[in-house]
Amino acid sequence: MRPFAWEDAAHLFGWFPDEAAVVAWAGPSTQYPLDQRQLAGMLADPNRTIWTPTLAGEVAGHFQLFYDRRRRTMRLGRFTIAPGLRGRGLATPLVRLAAGLAFAEPDVQRMELQVYEHNLPARAAYTRAGFTLDGILREDLPVVSGGETRVWSTGVMSLLRSEWRG
């Protein structure tokens, strides 16, 4: 794993073929198509660190950590595995790696994330990594998918320092 570099952006731009895929990855504040302007905004945030996991020297995924000092919380977001590597069991170990980075900060007491309720593989990976479902924001996000608008529900999950087994 290494910090994100601009050379990694070309991979990300090709991983999200439509609005639903971009929103599933980055939430409602990110627009399709993902572009350099949006990525530059993410990189400019001083509370955000952006990471590029690698496998055999190749880009294997992407995730971001956002440090909310006031809440003593690290938020895991924009987590994805490279399309050609999905389904190989890499998500849970990568989430654990992200948690290790989060809890390396001595003031962090809680790690949290949001996951769309219908994304069962992601929810399962987060649960295997030790996260607990705190609740569901029911029907909170309309998303256009295949020319049809669907309303997604969002799960909020967390992992406390006292639960972390790094």
Image (cartoon, rainbow, N blue to C red):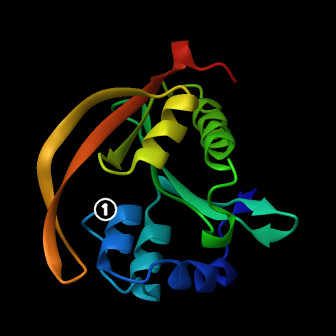
Q: Residue at x 39, y 79 (%)?
A: 38
Residue identified by numbered label 1 = 27
Count of marks placed on residues: 1
Left or right: residue 136 versus residue 128 is left
Looking at the picture, which amino acid does disc 1 mark? Gly
The residue lying toward the viewer, choosing from 13 and 118, is 118
Point out the residue furthest to the right here. 56
Quadrant holding the N terminus: bottom right
Q: Position of residue 124 (x, y in %)?
A: 49, 38
Q: Pointer 1: residues within 10 angstroms few (<14), some, or many (20+)?
A: some
Q: Image point 59% across, 62% down: which residue?
A: 62
Which quarter of the figure is the C terminus placed in? Answer: top right
Q: Is residue 114 left or right of residue 78?
A: left
- Residue at 55 percent across and 78 percent down: it is 12
Q: Is residue 76 visible?
A: yes
Secondary structure found at label 1: loop
Is residue 66 visible in the rendered image? The answer is no
On the rendered structure, is 154 left or right of 41? left
Q: Position of residue 99 (x, y in %)?
A: 59, 36
